[in-house]
Structure formats: C-alpha cells, structure tokens
Image (cartoon, rainbow, N blue to C red):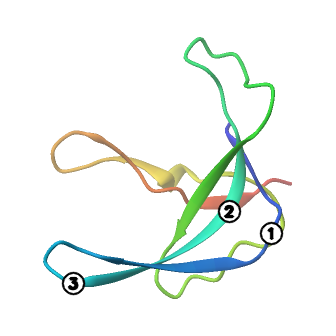
C-alpha cells in the first residue's frame, strides 16, 4: 500500500499557456508520499508530491490516505494508466 499524507488543506491554482496560446488552469495540492525504491525498500523519508485535483473537486482534508483501486487502469492502448484518487486510511 502506498500511503499519502496531506498536511495542508489549501489547494493552489496554476495557469499554463500552451504554444498555441490556449490557457489551462490546474488546481493542485501538496502532499507527501511514502514510497519505495526499485528494490522494494521503503524510502527513509516521505517525498513531496503534487496532487492534481479534478475540476470542481474539493481539496483533500488533512489526514492519511491510500490510493483507491480506481487510480490504476489499462487504457485503450494497453498501457498502464494512473490518476491518483485518494481514500482515507482508517
């Protein structure tokens, strides 16, 4: 299980302009992921990550979460796809 800790409930907006001049706004929230190295050993410290929130999604509350099973799927090209959705750890 990958554990994600949200310490700050504030989400921030970021606007990016594409080469074609179109603007996109992203809403992001900082969190910390307790991950593993390529050999499966836990990293000694959590790593800072940025969570992209879907349009209209409320920021995650302070707490400890894990990845929901719906976070991972196989796309139409048979590639493994990931879009983190968090569920609280009890």
Residue placed most toward the observer, 88 or 4: 4
- Disc 3, SS: loop
Rendered-image quadrant of the C terminus: bottom right
- Disc 2, SS: strand
Residue 69, compared with residue 41, is above or below; it is: below
Q: In the rendered image, which residue does mark 3 sit on?
A: 22
Residue 67 visible here: no
Q: In the rendered image, which residue does mark 2 sit on?
A: 30
Q: In the rendered image, which residue does mark 1 sit on?
A: 8
Q: Quadrant of residue 87?
A: bottom right
Q: Residue at x 18, y 83 (%)?
A: 21
Residue placed most toward the observer, 49 or 1: 49
Residue 22, percent from left and from top? 21, 84
Q: Who comes first in sequence, dot 2 or dot 1?
A: 1
Residue 65, percent from left and from top? 74, 55
Q: Residue at x 58, y 62 (%)?
A: 51
Pointer 1: residues within 10 angstroms few (<14), some, or many (20+)? some
Query: Which residue reaches farthest bottom?
Result: 56
Q: Quadrant of residue 7?
A: bottom right
Spatial CA distance of label 2 from label 1 is 7 Å
Q: Are marks 2 and 1 in contact (CB under 8 Å)?
A: yes
Residue 69, percent from left and from top? 54, 50
Rendered-image quadrant of the N terminus: top right
Residue 82, percent from left and from top? 42, 49
Q: Residue at x 83, y 68 (%)?
A: 62
Q: Residue at x 70, y 16 (%)?
A: 41
Q: Who comes first in sequence, dot 1 or dot 3?
A: 1
Residue placed most toward the observer, 76 or 10: 10
Spatial CA distance of label 1 from label 3 is 30 Å
């Amino acid at each position: 299980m990958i554990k994600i800790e949200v310490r700050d409930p504030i989400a921030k907006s970021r606007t990016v302009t594409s080469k074609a001049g179109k603007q996109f706004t992203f809403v992001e929230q900082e969190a910390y992921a307790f991950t593993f190295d390529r050999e499966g050993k836990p990293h000694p410290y959590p790593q800072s990550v940025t969570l992209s929130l879907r349009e209209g999604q409320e920021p995650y509350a302070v707490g400890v979460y894990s990845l929901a099973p719906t976070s991972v799927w196989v796309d139409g090209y048979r590639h493994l796809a990931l879009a983190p959705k968090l569920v609280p750890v009890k």
